[in-house]
Image (cartoon, helix red, strand yellow):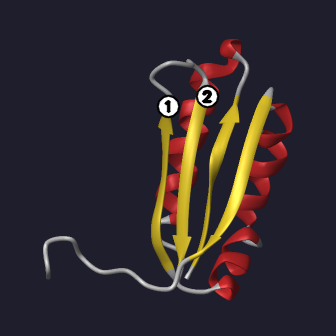
Amino acid sequence: MHALSGYLEFPEDQREATLTALRDVCARSRQDAGCIDYWWAEDVEQPNRFHFFECWETLAAFESHQAQPYELAFMAEHVSRITGFDAHTLDIAGRDSVLGG
């Protein structure tokens, strides 16, 4: 599995546009082939800092997602205006339910 996690900070005056864009990119990304998990969440201590996590079955699935037109548009329209960021890739060997199922 291939995963990416980190955060992006956006300008406060563009909060509503950011929230709308994050809702849209989440809904679309979760439908992409190979998506295991994809989410954004605002930091409770730093407004307008949004943490993300995405996990894909394979690196190829992640790369295919990155090439989708909606993802390219999100990057061009919203990531270009970030005020801070950090991100890391993760290689995950597998996953098991903590509930045993």
Residue 13 versus residue 72 in the image, above or below: above
Locate residue 45 relative to residue 62 in the image: left or right.
left
Mark 2, other Cα within 10 Å: few <14 / some 14–19 / many ≥20? many
Residue 43 versus residue 12 in the image, above or below: below
- Judged from the image, the secondary structure of the residue bearing numbered disc 1 is strand
Residue ID at (58%, 53%): 25
Q: Position of residue 20 (x, y in %)?
A: 55, 35
Whether tag 1 and tag 2 are in contact, CB under 8 A, the answer is: yes
- The disc labelled 1 sits on which kind of residue? Glu
- Judged from the image, the secondary structure of the residue bearing numbered disc 2 is strand
Q: Position of residue 7 (x, y in %)?
A: 65, 41
Question: Across the whole image, how many numbered discs are drawn on residues?
Answer: 2
Locate residue 1 relative to residue 95 in the image: left or right.
right
- The disc labelled 2 sits on which kind of residue? Arg
Mark 1, other Cα within 10 Å: few <14 / some 14–19 / many ≥20? some
Residue ID at (79%, 59%): 72
Mark 1 highlights which residue? 42
Q: Residue furthest top?
A: 13
Indicate which disc, 1 or 2, sits on the residue closer to the N terminus: 1
User: Residue 49's mark?
Assistant: 2
